[in-house]
Amino acid sequence: MDDFIAARAQMAMSLGFHIIFSCVGMVMPFLMAFAHWKYLKTKNEVYKGLTKAWSKGVAILFATGAVSGTMLSFELGLLWPGFMKHAGPIFGMPFSLEGTAFFIEAIAIGFFLYGWDRFNKWFHWFCGFLVGLSGLASGILVVAANAWMNSPAGFDYINGQYVNIDPIKAMFNDAWFPQALHMTVAAFCATGFAVAGVHAFLIMKKKNVEFHTKAFKIAAGFALIGAFGAPLSGDIAAKSVAERQPIKLAAMEAHFETEKGAAFVLGGIPDEEKGEIKYAVKIPKVLSFLVSNDFNSEVKGLNDFPKDEWPPIAVVHYAFQIMIFFGVIMICIGIVYLYAFFFRKEWLDKNWLLKTFLIATPFGYIALEAGWTVTEVGRQPWIIYGIMRTADAVTPMPGIQYSFYFFTAIFVSLSLIIIFLLRRQIQMVPRLYDPTDAQFNDKNKKS
């Protein structure tokens, strides 16, 4: 493994790991706040226990996200000093604001965890809601920085120099809204399905059924918001990519020849040497419509661009197909659940419906990781699109592969610790969080 590949592999692994915790931090506090609101309205102690259980999970995952996010900030300087030298002054503002949002989130979590029976009940609820707002803001600000890499703005590039820097314009670049919107919707979808799947499994195990049923319904509702919002946000993002990065769009669809009335491709195996895609299902004119709302509009193909500017076509295409595949499955699950909720209430207690959500537990995060693969790999060979190549930004320091191995070991260790802590949280539900359980009542009597 040479240093350039090791640096890219380390960054990919770190981002792939951290993005999960970013999404949890953006969404899970809202589930917690919703359960808390239900408790304040209904005085049902089960919702109070659910809020406390979820808040402990939020704290565990927040701490892990803080560690992985801090590691990422060091990695940017360690692996890509050429990038940070020039880009830091331009897009540093969203990172600075993200730090502010992070500190607000940390303070709000502390207030919420230790504020039971100490604060006014609605102020206490607002602290939990503020955790979600600051987590959402934090995620959006980081995405704004990434969007700048895909759509650089806020400076003039003259004779190799970055001049006339405007940090506000850099932060609110052309890509930030489409990326931030799609990322937020995907986070709700992925986290909602993951949480619903865990609670569906525990309902099937006949453990604390009322507790986990209430949790499942809340999580499923959030999952459906994300699943049904994803096609709309995805359409906005795709139109933005078509305008700003037509070569990325062509790679997503393995679209080699410029043509009018371009077909939307499902599946297939790209052949870069022959400039074609084999075994694909093509839906005539749909790609043109998705790009410009015109079935006969022209879509540029890869062959219109220099080959040294092509991203890895197969990786981008397969990742895009994976994202679409799992996204469609989650939409179908959402349709079935809504049909059951409104017309077939008896289905809601059926094991087959719970099993469906259990199987779908990882689907949102698989689609999310695939979508970020499209975003990041599709930008290659540029680290700043059209301005700086990734190879020119990498550190000259040798031995990066050892750094890759070291960081991999850290992330594996963190994963095992998280699994242990969350598993213990689930096991403590009967004793600490579910007031309908005999173990909970026995513990309270003893104390």
Image (spheres, rainbow, N blue to C red):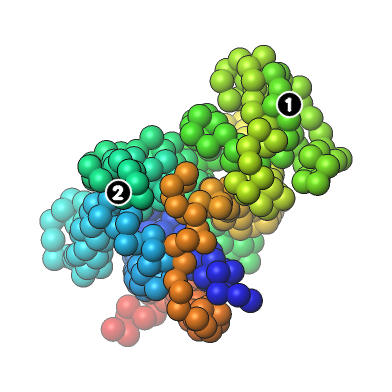
Q: Quadrant of the N terminus?
A: bottom right
> Where 427 sits versus 363, above or below?
below
Residue closest to the eye, 413 or 316:
316
Q: Is residue 348 visible?
A: no
Seen from this angle, which residue lies furthest right?
279
Q: Which x, y percent locates residue 171?
A: 29, 44
Residue at point 50%, 58% (across, down): 390
Front label number (1 vs 2): 2
Query: CB atoms at circles 1 and 2 under 8 Å apart?
Result: no
> Where 204 sits versus 260, above or below?
below
For residue 322, side relative to residue 83 (left or right): right
Mark 1 crowd level (few <14, some 14–19, many ≥20, 10 Å Cα): many
Q: Which x, y percent locates residue 327?
A: 62, 43
Mark 1 or 2 closer to N-term?
2
Residue at point 56%, 20% (across, down): 292
Residue at point 60%, 75% (across, down): 2
> Where 430 sits versus 177, above or below?
below
> Where 100 sits versus 160, above or below?
below
Residue closest to the eye, 157 or 69:
157
Q: Quadrant of the C terminus?
A: bottom left
Q: Which x, y percent locates residue 154?
A: 29, 41
**Which amino acid type corresponds to the residue marked 2 in the rendered image?**
Tyr
Q: Which x, y percent locates residue 12?
A: 53, 64
Q: Give the residue number, with chain letter if any, for mark 1.
A: 263
Element type where label 2 sits in the image: strand
Residue closest to the eye, 217 or 312:
312
- What is the spatial separation of the Cα atoms under label 1 and label 2, in whole angstroms? 40 Å
Mark 2 crowd level (few <14, some 14–19, many ≥20, 10 Å Cα): some
Marks counted in the figure total 2
Q: Give the residue number, with chain letter if any, for mark 2.
A: 162
